[in-house]
Amino acid sequence: MRILLAEDDEVLSDGISKALRQCGYTVDHVSTGAEADVAIKSAPFDLAILDLGLPQLDGFEVLKRMRAAGKRFPVLIVTARDGLHDRVAGLDLGADDYVVKPFDLPELEARVRALIRRSNFGAEKEIVLGLIRMDTVSRSITIGGEHVEFSSRELAVFEILLQRPGKVVSKEQLLDHMYGFDDDVGQNAIEVLIHRLRKKIESYGLAIRTIRGLGYLLESGT
């Protein structure tokens, strides 16, 4: 899952980025509102963490522009402004949650998980697809009743495929949601991850089909 972090405090942004990456998320960090505006137009994100006091464009203007452009991924506002007026204004402009500085990183991580979970799976705490069960809170996966361990990258691929049952997912879609602007990777990285996933799930009678020229399709078994 790919997150945009728009925060001009270098110490705070570094701490947030490291914490979220340890949770398995890809994080693109920008320090101005103008950079955030360009990033939102340039890449598909699963969530944005947006400071209100950004230079060049403030967070309210960034949020207003992205919603006007039809970008519907969730937005978590993180700011030192704790007034009721600011909270109401942010929510009215289309923010999904609001955290006031200072805050504890575990709380931020929990809010991020909740927003991404609701965006991708609605209110469901468990997704069942054939033999596959995914706990959307812990992001743990069992197949045929057995817990299966995935690396963070493998889990990201599997989760994206699981979100689109019966649909083909292209390599470009996987790359866009898994790697940031600074990641120098090609489509062969996706091929390697798909190969590893196939080895882990084939013993359960599952398969990831390659649809030539289009992408990949998860066959969930019965």
Image: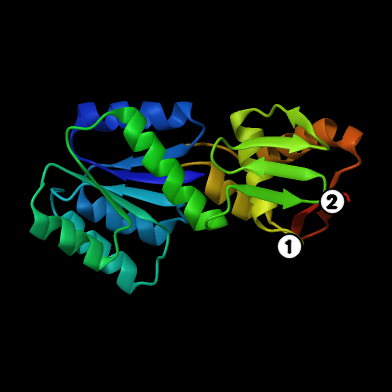
Q: Badge 1 is on which residue?
A: 167
Q: Taking 185 as reference, is 18 above or below it?
A: above
**Coordinates of residue 28 in the picture (x, y in percent):** 39, 41
Name which residue lies at 33% across and 57% down: 96
> Could you say which disc has been placed on residue 31 in the image?
none
- The residue tagged with tag 1: helix, strand or loop? loop
Q: Is residue 202 left or right of residue 98?
A: right
Tell me the colour scheme of the image.
Answer: rainbow
Q: Residues within 10 Å of mark 2 (few under 14, many from 20)?
A: some
**Among the 4 quarters of the image, the one containing residue 29:** top left
Q: Amino acid at mark 1?
A: Lys
Helix, strand or loop status at disc 2: strand
Answer with mark 1 or mark 2, whichever residue precedes in sequence: 1
Give the residue pinned by disc 2.
209
Residue 26: percent from left, percent from top: 47, 38
Q: Residue, x 72% and y 50% (percent of image)?
A: 128
Foreground pick, 7 / 135: 135
- Residue 134 as seen in the image, left or right of residue 54: right
**Residue drawn 17% across and 37% down?**
101
Q: Position of residue 130 (x, y in %)?
A: 81, 51
Q: CA distance from mark 1 to mark 2?
A: 11 Å
Q: Is residue 57 visible?
A: no
Mark 1 Cα-neighbour bin, 10 Å: few <14, some 14–19, many ≥20: some
User: Is residue 196 among the parts visible in the rendering?
Assistant: yes
Q: Name which residue type carries label 2.
A: Arg
